[in-house]
Image: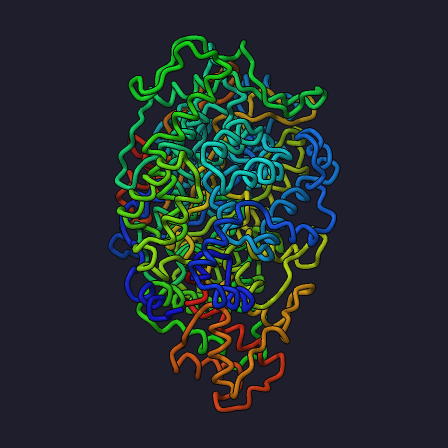
Amino acid sequence: MISRLTFGATPELQAAVEAQGVAAWIEDQLSKTGPDPSVDGRFEDFVGFGGGTHRDMWIRYSEQGHRHEQAETTLSQVLRARHSDHQLYEMMCQLWNDHFSVYWIGSDRMEHLSFSFQEWVIRPHAMTNFRDLLKATAASPAMLAYLDNDRSEGNKSINENYGRELLELHTLGIKPDDTQVYNEADVLAASQVMSGWWLDRNFGNEDFLRVHFRDDLAYEGPISLLNGAWTRGNIAPADGADSMLDFLAMHPSTAEHVAYKICRRFVADQPPASLVQSAAQVYLANDTAIVPVLRHVFTSAEFAASEGQKFRRPFEVLVAMFRALHIDAPPSPFHPAKGWVMHDFLFASGNQPGTWETPDGFPDNTVFWLTTLGLLNRWNAAARLARNRQRGSTPDYGRLRPAAADVGELIEKLAVQFGIGALTGEDVRNIAQGAGVAIGDSAEVDDATLGDIATYLLIHPLFSIR
Amino acid sequence: MSSLSRRRFLAGSGLATAGAISLAGARFAFAAPGTPNTGDVLVVLNLGGGVDSLIMTPPYDYPSYHQMRPLTKVLPPGENGGALPLTSATANGNALFPTGIEGVVGLHPAMAPVYETLWPTGNLAIVPSIGIPRSEDPTRSHFSARRVLERGTADNTVGGGWMGRALNLANPPGLVGGFNFSKQSLALSSGDRIISGQNAADFGFEDFDGLVSPAATIGSLFSGADSVSTEGRLALDVTTSLSQLDFSLRPGYPDTEMGRSLSQIATMLKADVGLHAAIMETGNWDHHDALGETGDTEGPFWSLASDMAQAMRAFADDTNQLEEITLVTVCEFGRTIEEKSNTGSDHGRATAFMAMGQGIQGGVFGNDFPDTIEHAGWGGDLEVLTDFRTMLSEILRKRMGVSNLDVVFPTYDGAPELGLAR
């Protein structure tokens, strides 16, 4: 259960859940709808936390360089996923980062907008309500630049990129059976509504990176969506987006789409339709609030019946390894583990935040991530971390080591500690043998042997499943 | 925590192995694996940045060429630094020119190592004025054009790349499948058994030293019938195979990135690990400056082309002149007709692709080549007269045995084949 709602089990977490019971723990996680302030002290020298405007952020990062911003954006996510007690909240942040995916790497249109997108747009709304989250993304410089809305001229040449993705990816969506409620005319209509929302990209200007509405760029004519289900009518163009986004946020297709994404994240690659439908109803009944939907999903019969259906993506497995081994996440872009974490593992595994090129975000299914290289990367990561081969990322072997009568029991307890659960007798014997000991040997093995045992446990297929 | 229910995942769900995955947000259409065949190995060289085809395949006799490119033009054959002639005579009658483009364009002299060994035997095909049609990408943006080149379509709901889809369809026997040396290209992605890495030698177990038979232990943990275990055993086999190979630079190969990558491909081929497709970068051809001056036999363009040609030559010599291999050079676009005073050129449209191998019919192909380059095309560019997918489709069909080309290139309407593959 813990693994399903978090980035990985830790003994402390297991004890907490044991003490209060699963139901109470879930409620507790549902109440933690914002960042865990206790994590803040772990960050060292992140310029991204300097506050101010997007322009201020841009200036800070242009002094440090684009790579530095990438590093801060990625590492802040790793660090929070590793250390935050608000685990469910952090998982929701990741879900929305995927849902409203914006691509950073090598894109000159996205310069220095990634950290603030995460920090100021996604994170404040990750567990409040979808309407506010949607509106925040629609008004963000990052999204407008990424999807070219700032190149859209309402009465001359409309750019349909954002309008399309707004309907297809962010709200109404295409259903699992490939049907959709909107058509090309609606894409155009949505683009017309969004026209006028412009981003000042002139560094010299006071308003640099500020999003504002320009009447001269806004489409003037009447606009109708979904056969008149929504029309701009007499609404002033400047208020059109707000009205349309209200309509889209509360549309049944959007409810289903959001419910689907949540179910896919926490239940299974192909979640039960019954659960998606009922969760969509809860979404609508609660005016797009996210927590009630989550509560509904986590307390459902379908959720209870579907343990072990999700394959951990590289980001998740890395954090789970850090958590299992009590390794602290790199606290700064200058930390010795930064290169390995960001480039050798996350980027090489195709899961470094911000590196997914298209707006549909990182896939959330087993087929995509279960690859030869994907597995080899996590096996090598397991050895590197558990055997203390990464400078600056030493496991806390003392905290790791469970009390046990013999090696066999040690392995079994460690497996439970790692969230794997019960192993077969054969696996226990093979792991012992692989670590150069036998199951009947004394449990007082040295740290190196403990690390070897841990390596194989992290490699075990069940560690990659939640 | 019940491990029984965890194991249910491992026992039951399995991989979706065929057909499109129609989940909202999922963009990959995995082709159903075709009947296994033993077609050519496809090696693709990305000339990223946009190779200037007026330099790589110069129309050296055109008065308009001399007029438009006074500083950078490549001289006619015979002159110092002059082009290599693409004529029937120089190919001993082994080359074809179906659309009459004979002696019209030549090959840049730095390509001599490749020309010498593959042109006279009729195994080097050139296609000038090829590229991405404007209907697929009206921009000259690297990012956008590369995506179309790699994806094989302008439709950005199609994920992965054309080579990955082709590899799935070809479903060749053996372990490895495809090797992607390119950090940037997604052409060879979203397929089964594709390995990515800048160095095949990296593909191995790291940090497992001192452990007693780690492969056997890992194998014992992945012994089930479920999808994760099955993939795990494959990963183990591939890693074990590759990690046993000696990837040090083979004799004759230049010690450059290309030389090393091609040498590694050769090593994998000789070890019979089932490699059937590979792609790599060849450096940055984005010559906004420094194309080199007329008659130069040095400079950035020359070095790039020369390094590439030497690596290709070593590879050809090492593989019996590309026996059962088809090697193709591609790039996202060409460059403007007009040169700049700093001897560079801007992003253009049409460029030149090459194909070579024992299964390739040598010659110069393509729908056409303009009679003059003065005002050819829109905005001062060479117009794309042959769709890049026409060339690639023929190679896939004839050399790799892939017939569902509509899956590989979903928005491509098809066109008569060029005749450059046997």
**Considering depth in this image, is B303 or B151 the residue closer to the camera?**
B151
Q: Is residue A450 left or right of residue A412?
A: right
Residue A78 percent location from the top left of the image: 59, 53
Q: Quadrant of residue A291?
A: top left
- Res. B122 visible in picture: no
Q: How is the image coloured?
A: rainbow
Residue B58 percent location from the top left of the image: 53, 29
**Considering depth in this image, is B401 or A342 the residue closer to the camera?**
A342
Quarter in which the N terminus of chain B is drawn: bottom left
Residue B291 percent location from the top left of the image: 64, 31
**Considering depth in this image, is A231 or B157 the residue closer to the camera?**
A231
**Considering depth in this image, is A71 or A4 the residue closer to the camera?**
A4
Residue A430 percent location from the top left of the image: 44, 81
- Res. A142 visible in picture: yes
Q: Residue at x 39, y 82 (%)?
A: A425
Q: Residue at x 47, y 22 (%)?
A: A242
Q: Is residue A150 above or below residue A6?
A: above
Q: Is residue A324 left or right of residue A264?
A: right
Q: Is residue A96 left or right of residue B308?
A: left
Q: Is residue B212 left or right of residue B415?
A: right
Q: How many marks?
A: 0
